[in-house]
Image: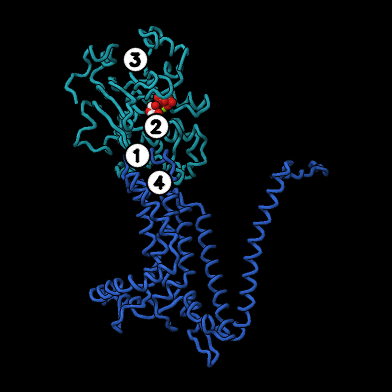
Chain colours: A blue, B cyan
Amino acid sequence: MTVAPQDLKPRALVSGASFNRGDRVFNRVITLAAFTALFVLAGITVFLGYQFIPVVQEQGLFFFTGSAWDPAAGRYGIWAMVYGSILLSVIALIVAVPASLLLSIFMVFLAPRRVSAVLTNLVDLMAAIPSIILGLWGFWVFQQVAADWSELLNRYFGWIPLFQNSSGNFTGTPFIAGLVLAVMMIPITTSVTREVMARTPPELINAAESLGCSLYSMLRHVALPFGRGGLIGGVMLGLGRALGETVAVFFVIKLVFDVNLFRILESEGGSVASMIVAKFGEANEQELQVLLAAGFVLFVGTLIVNLIANAIVGRTGRLSS
Amino acid sequence: MSSTPPATPAATPASTPTAAGGSPAMQSRHLSVWFGKRKVLEDVNISFPANTCTALIGPSGCGKSTYIRTLNRLHELIPGAGLAGDVLHNGRDIYARDVDPVTVRLAIGMVFQKPNPFPSMTIRGNVLSGLKLSGMKRPNHDEIVEDTLRKAGLWNEVKDRLSHAAGELSGGQAQRLVIARALAVQPQVLLMDEPCSALDPASTLKIEETIRELAESITIIIVTHNMQQATRVSDYTAFFLAAENEPGIVVEQGATTEIFSNPQDPRTLDYVNGRFG
Ligand SMILES: Nc1ncnc2c1ncn2[C@@H]1O[C@H](COP(=O)(O)OP(=O)(O)OP(=O)(O)O)[C@@H](O)[C@H]1O
Ligand SMILES: [Mg+2]
């Protein structure tokens, strides 16, 4: 056996170092900016976590699994709101994802160039509408229309538990709040998915075309698998907005601290973010702490969703054979 | 468009290759092509006899790629594309109203300059992708995979990793994979637009070998900038040329040996001897 030479050490490779003074200053500034962002994020986490721990100690498991807001008894449980966030997000996703995909497919592959340019600008403009405006619109304009749709849904599909309604009041429902969230998601998600679709390499499109394939199978086997990561990213960006949305949901939903499992046409629901906005104004010291703890839960939840999405994106897609 | 018979001496000054064989597999008659208002090809008349290989040569930008893309109706997918004249496949106008472009593209396959296997599919998946994408039904997929990969000269290199990602192949292997993919849908004509331009000499030779074998059973039309390649693989050659701000035309066409050893037009002589373009 040969003995490995003792003095064989890998040399330090300083990549990115530059002898140019301007470059070095620039690198420092960039690094500093990046770390500032990290510090701010860490600061928020610590601050929220600091509020979160005593609340959990005080409320115990009830904080996560219970549903109550009782300042008199000092009992707080946010499960209904957490679940409400999930329910609203699911409704928003079910509506917004297909709509965004279809819209971006239309803009990239079907629409004449001029129409597609106009649509692109329009979508970007919509993405910039402040959520308070959408909330007002949801409350004053959309709510009535959506309530009418809900009534129709209830009349014809009321036999499905999903569409049951016991009160006859169709406003303030998770359905409407979910739709408002979908309206917020669509422009953001669409602007990303459009960009991703537009980047399908032309040579792959050429290949598919020369094999005599329809638009549908080109999308299914070429464009969508190719853009998978970016498409998921677009959906996540939209979902992030939906999860954190406060005002718009607050305007259109009737906040009830009771888990509404699936009856989306029932006038009761909520979400963590809208709860915070609803209770914040007249909160006493203890309530304030609970709200911050709820904020921490929302923060962690969003983080988890993003981690899952990252994992999905990172996993190389299953190869089709 | 026009009712002129195919090879009127007036329309095609140089002798038409058809003279050699029976009826041509492909033929373009008085074909002119536009991008928007810009005419890039004018009155192209070429016949491609069945089971032969024809090389299209000419300087960059004279319209060879454009021409080859009109032969399987890929040209029309570009916004603003226009075309006059007609293209016959087995005597039928492929641009006729009742012809489905999908059927045309299946019968007339294409290999592009840049290898373009589908990265989200395995090697095997790529070979079979034409069947999947077009919904064509053929039994015995394993046999198709082996047979086409053998024809493309790739079988021995990939037979043990058919389920690997196509992305791990080298450029030359990827190009041969793409050829196998084109063959799997059993085209009668194969269009190749500079298929070897991104490849090393060894891969190039392999693909040329493949082309010569394929030309025994199907009709091949290949664009190339490599004069030696044209002489090695083709039976016939057509020389395209575009004067500045003029549409491209076919200056001369005929048997490859004739075009290279005894061209009638001085411009052809200059080009094949590498004096311009
Ligand atoms: N999509 C397009 N839109 C507008 N003009 C185009 C388009 N594609 C090609 N052209 C023009 O048509 C002419 C012919 O181009 P083409 O690609 O057919 O040339 P080529 O002979 O294949 O050249 P090369 O040998 O460099 O590949 C060129 O002047 C080119 O600028
Ligand atoms: Mg070209």
Chain of the residue that carries numbered disc 1 in the rendered image: A
Chain letter of disc 3?
B
Identify whether A279 is placed above or below A103.
below
Q: Which residue is mark 4?
A: A222
Nearest the viewer among A141 and B90 is A141
Tag 4 secondary structure: helix
Q: The residue under label 4 is which amino acid type? A: Val
The secondary structure type at the circle numbered 1 is helix
Mark-to-mark CA distance, 4 and 2: 17 Å
Residue B251, numbered label: 3
Name the kind of residue labelled 2 in the image.
Answer: Val
Height in image: A108 above or below B116? below
Horizontal side of residue B59 vs B92, given as left or right:
right
User: Residue, x 57% and y 82% (percent of image)?
Assistant: A288
Q: Which residue does the numbered mark 1 point to in the structure image?
A: A209
Q: Residue furthest left?
A: B3
